[in-house]
Amino acid sequence: MKNISKKQRFGLSLLSGILLGISFPYTGSLFFLSFVAWVPLLILEKNISDKNYKSQKVFTHAYLVFFMFNLITTWWIFYASAGGVVMAVLANSLIMAFVFYCFHLTKKYVGKKEGYIALLIFWVAFEYMHYHWELSWPWLNLGNTFARIPWMVQWYSYTGVLGGTLWILFINYLIFRLFDKIKIEKRNWRAEFPLVLFTGLVLIVPIVISVVQYATYVEKENPINIVLIQPNIDPYNEKFTAGLEGQIDKIIALADKKVNSETDLVMAPETALSYEFDEDLFHRYPFSELLKSATKRWGCNLLIGASTVRTFEKKNSTASRPMYDGPGYWESYNTSLLLSDEGEATFLHKSKLVLGVEKVPFISSLPFLEKYSIEQGGASGTLGVEKEPQTLHTPNGVIAPVICYESVYGEFVGQQVQKGAELITIITNDGWWRDTPGYKQHMGFARLRAVENRRSVARSANTGTSGFINQRGDVIQSSSWWEPTVLSQSVNKNRELTIYSQYGDYIGRSFAFVSVLLLIFTFVRRFKKKYGVLQTK
């Protein structure tokens, strides 16, 4: 391979990062570029390897690639928190670059074939890990690239998003191989026709399968009629500063426009009840009478977001804080409140918390980090969570109560479905990000949850996109940005489980296990070579 200059290497890095960024939903949405976006990065990695340059160069260029990718796709976090966007872009780029660097080391110390296989394994394992550790941020998982076009990945009902990640990476590797053989090694393309054919099949066959699934999938008639509220209350200047009763009146007035005798459920967004209250004392608050009066008049249940607290005699979790004026502890929650038409209240708490705003990472080991939490919406620090995914039972079916960021976690929602949820309900407040790609991407991810589990989705947002999604991932009704809206729709429930609903991220778990073994083997080989223990033939 001929030498690539330093300037050309940085050009390839920028090209790869830009292609990744503009292939992602709503920051370009040129999804087909995702199948070649990694090729420039693989070309420069091969050049660095072939010229025996220091491995640190691979890390440097990989960091630039993923910095561009993160910046282009998630710059909008700035509107919620300037510090948050710095943390998200810089830290996530660092982690991604390290994963790519591990691939380079495996390729260098174990073998080229093993190395390229390791790239697929390491990256899928990393995305799986990003669902489960303290710095969880799976927003940019490669499989999310198809959030705007779920007709193309109907097979997510078998693999989940990680199947899409594997697909993208494998095609990038095959195209890189073709480029290397034909353009760099100057081989005749006819001699590489089998590889060309195989690459085409890997690209086209999953699309054909998906189109057939999309065209033939028929929902079973099992309707539930839902009214969604989008109150459009400014989260910066009104939601957490204006009177609560006035906001509740606005929600009830919007609902009254659509609720009728056929309505089974009314939904209002995350933290619609924005002032913290004690769950045990709910029925004593004046605002509870407004809500109970409305549900009784409507004759149906209300699912609404709330900020709540609970008290404990002893420390309950790392989120527990000492009482200000006496013994005991209290915890804050981001809560789904289900209120029946008879006034019965059920509370479930958000489990997947937003990093920096609702959760401080590693706080159990490093409690002093609590003071660095970001204040947003009147709350800061680590919130309490449910120990495992839960469902809510209504007279008209079992629902998966998903709060905001939880809708990014495919396996989490799948576990709710596994526990009997017939419908996915999402309440969120995407107004923090203003009119940017953020709330649009978030809505797109909900479409993937519908496909993975073959469940209809009802999504109530404070602003942004509220709407209904069918079991194929089609948006069948939606709201506009920054507009008070009430929507009514009948959607079908479903009791059947998909492969993904039953087994979750089995690809990620398998690859995570193998990646640990590969990493151990890589660093053993590196250690032996560095200290002259490894003998080569």
Image: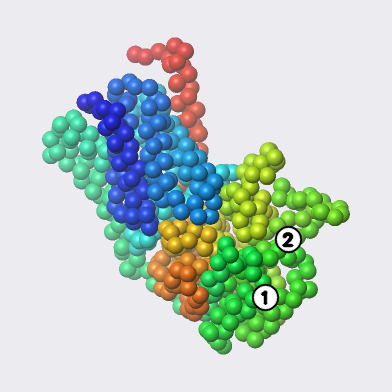
Q: Residue at x 71, y 75 (%)?
A: 287
| Crowdedness near tag 2: few (<14), some (14–19) or many (≥20) residues, C-alpha within 10 Å | some
Q: Nearer the viewer, residue 103 or 438?
A: 438
Kind of residue indicated by mark 1 = Glu
Q: Is residue 487 above or below residue 177?
A: below
Residue at left offset 63%, top offset 64%: 240
The residue under the point 40% across, 41% down is 66
Query: Residue beneath label 1, please?
Result: 245
- Residue under numbered circle 2: 309
x%, y% of residue 140?
44, 49
Farthest-out residue, front: 237
Above or below, 113 against 444 in this view is: above
Looking at the rendered structure, the secondary structure element under dot 1 is helix
Q: Nearer the viewer, mark 2 or mark 1?
A: 1
* Quadrant of the image occupied by residue 194: top left
Secondary structure of the residue carrying numbered label 2: strand
Task: State the image coordinates of residue 326 (x, y, percent, origin top left).
Answer: 87, 54
